[in-house]
Amino acid sequence: MNEQRIEMRTALNIGGPIIQVTGKRGGRKYELPALRGNPIVPSVTTIVGQTVRNMGLEIWREQWIARGLEQARDKRLSGTAIGGILSAANNEANVSAELGTQMHDIIDGLLKGNQEIVVPDQLEPAVRGFLRWRQAHANWEHIDSEVAVYTRDFAGTVDALFRDPVTERFIIVDWKTSSGIYDSALMQVAAYCHALDSMLLESGRLWMEDTVEGMIVRFDNDYPRDEDKKKIRTLPKVFSDRVQIAKVDRAKWWQAFHDCYNLHDGLKGAIKKEWL
């Protein structure tokens, strides 16, 4: 697969558009033509993904391999069979990612007042949950969806941007269809908040910091379970109408992300070696 380049609108059209570049191996970066020197910066998700060890993800992959080997016990495994066992976790991840994309598209359509949205039966409970969440924040003005935020050091794309007319603060919201809300997501949204704050300050639209808040909204889902309460991963995930919310503590999670950035930046440097 060749490098993919997409022109992205920026939040509030500040300093945009910018170019999102996805590499052959999946890494993502952004070109910032509006900034002096036309810098190319890594994405927030790339920074976090390359520096934070996700133990839950590693255990999940090991469990997939263990199940595959157990099912193949006493069998002679061909190269194709071994490849299937090793890639089973990736296949599930791709299915989950597709569900997440569908849910994002549905939410975007609802926020923009699209009257012709088709909701699959599987996601209908999650959509009910979203509508309940939206009713709870009915006074928030939806500004935009899928827009980029950036600094001279990093950039990323936010799921949705709102504004509270009472507090006059912006709220970045990240939609999740994952099985939980993880540290990586909190760092990600804190970085987006910091980036939008910087954009607002540098553009002269605001004269104070910390005008942006972050929130993660997760739609509850799980696999059906058998009589022993084990997940049946061969069946589609089941969503409920429950919604889990996490407000992002910017001071805490921005510092965590900043540490990840420093580590990521340091890893780019050449290691000096010498023999004694």
Image (cartoon, helix red, strand yellow):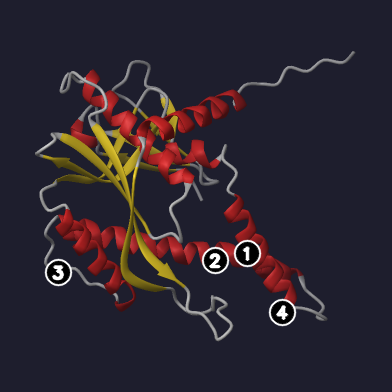
**x 19%, y 33%: residue:** 13
Which secondary structure, mark 3?
Answer: loop
- Residue tagged by mark 3? 116
| Marked residue nearer the N-terminal end (4 or 1) | 4
Pointers 2 and 4 in contact (CB under 8 A)? no
Quadrant hosting residue 239: bottom left
**x 16%, y 40%: residue:** 163
Residue type for callout 4: Gln
Residue 126 percent coordinates (x, y) = 30, 68
Q: CA distance from mark 1 to mark 3?
A: 37 Å
Pointers 4 and 1 in contact (CB under 8 A)? no
Residue 8 percent coordinates (x, y) = 29, 39
Pointers 1 and 3 in contact (CB under 8 A)? no
Is residue 177 visible to the viewer in this orientation of the structure? Answer: yes
Residue type for callout 2: Asn
Q: Residues within 10 Å of mark 4 (few under 14, many from 20)?
A: few
Residue 189 percent coordinates (x, y) = 36, 40
**x 17%, y 22%: residue:** 206
Q: Residues within 10 Å of mark 1 (few under 14, many from 20)?
A: some
Q: Residues within 10 Å of mark 2 (few under 14, many from 20)?
A: few
Q: CA distance from mark 2 to mark 1?
A: 6 Å
Q: CA distance from mark 4 to mark 1?
A: 15 Å
Pointers 2 and 1 in contact (CB under 8 A)? yes
- Residue tagged by mark 1? 87
Residue 40 placement, left or right of 92: left
Which secondary structure, mark 1?
Answer: helix
- Residue tagged by mark 4? 71
